[in-house]
Image: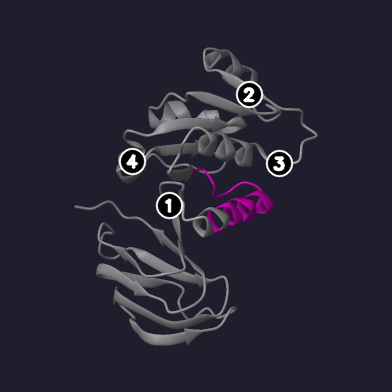
Amino acid sequence: MTAMTKFVILLGGDVTPTQRLRHQLANAAVIAADSGIGHAALLGVTPLLWVGDFDSSTAEQKKTYAHVPRQTYNAEKDATDGELAISEALRRGASELVLVGGFGGQFDHTMAHVSFLLSLTRRDIPVFMTSGHEEAHVLNHDLEFTDIAIGTRISVVPVTDLKALTLAGVKWPLNRRDVPLGSALTLSNVVTGPVDIELKFGTALVVFYPRELD
């Protein structure tokens, strides 16, 4: 059996260095996308590669991380720095990805990061996005979360119409409920125990705001 190769992609959005996030970064290879390098010291990681056009990296960052190998691209390119970093991770054999810093910043870039999640999941590559205080996973089959603290706010955000959605381990459970695209029915639930989600058809984002476990 081939061992999982986890790659962390440092993006330029918001990051809070929680204990949960530090645990998720353990034993992972790290690639920074342009200004995402600014999260490296905060998280105590050293990127093996720094990718981008470097138009949003500071002079101080370029000096501090001069030892990190770079892949430099022209600013007038057909992909974002984050997309290039993900492609490089996959080229290097990544079989699992964590997108750190994908929330916040420009809305168009945040939506692009969500599209990366959807595309990678469609390719059966395990991936999620996190800022430390906000976490997103793609739901297109059954999912289970056993490591979310009781009292955590959790939402299921439809990307398509959802058929036969079942939610357990939350304050407001559902049993085989159809949820149309555009419905806010499944926003702002509360974790009461291990979360079990079943879905017959459709795609959604499971978004939660982690609280530290006692």
Task: Tell me residue 184's x, y (percent).
Answer: 52, 78
Of the numbered discs 4 and 3, the one sitting upstream in the chain is 4
Say if 207 sits above or below 57 in the image.
below
Residue furthest toward the front? 1
Earlier sequence position, callout 1 versus callout 2: 2
The secondary structure type at the circle numbered 1 is loop
Q: Residues within 10 Å of mark 1 (few under 14, many from 20)?
A: some
Give, as a three-letter code, the residue at label 2.
Gln
The kind of residue on which mark 3 rests is Ala
- Circle 2 residues within 10 Å: few <14, some 14–19, many ≥20: some
- In contact (CB < 8 Å): disc 4 and disc 3: no
Secondary structure beneath disc 4? loop
Crowding near pointer 4: few (<14 within 10 Å), some, many (20+)? few
The answer to whether residue 185 is magenta is no
Q: Which residue is mark 4?
A: 2
Instruction: Name the residue type under label 1.
Output: Pro
Instruction: Please report the bounds of the magenta region as a residue range.
Output: 100-118
Q: Nearer the viewer, residue 37 or 112?
A: 112
Q: Is residue 152 above or below residue 56?
A: below
How far, Cα to Cα, is label 3 from label 2? Answer: 14 Å
| Whole-number angstrom distance, CA of label 1 to CA of label 4 | 15 Å
Q: Secondary structure at mark 2?
A: strand
Q: Residue at x 46, y 47 (%)?
A: 131
**Gap in Å between the C-alphas at discs 4 and 2?**
28 Å
Task: Report the disc number at residue 126.
Answer: 1
Q: Which numbered disc, 1 or 3, marks the residue that appears first in the sequence?
A: 3
Marker disc for residue 79: 3
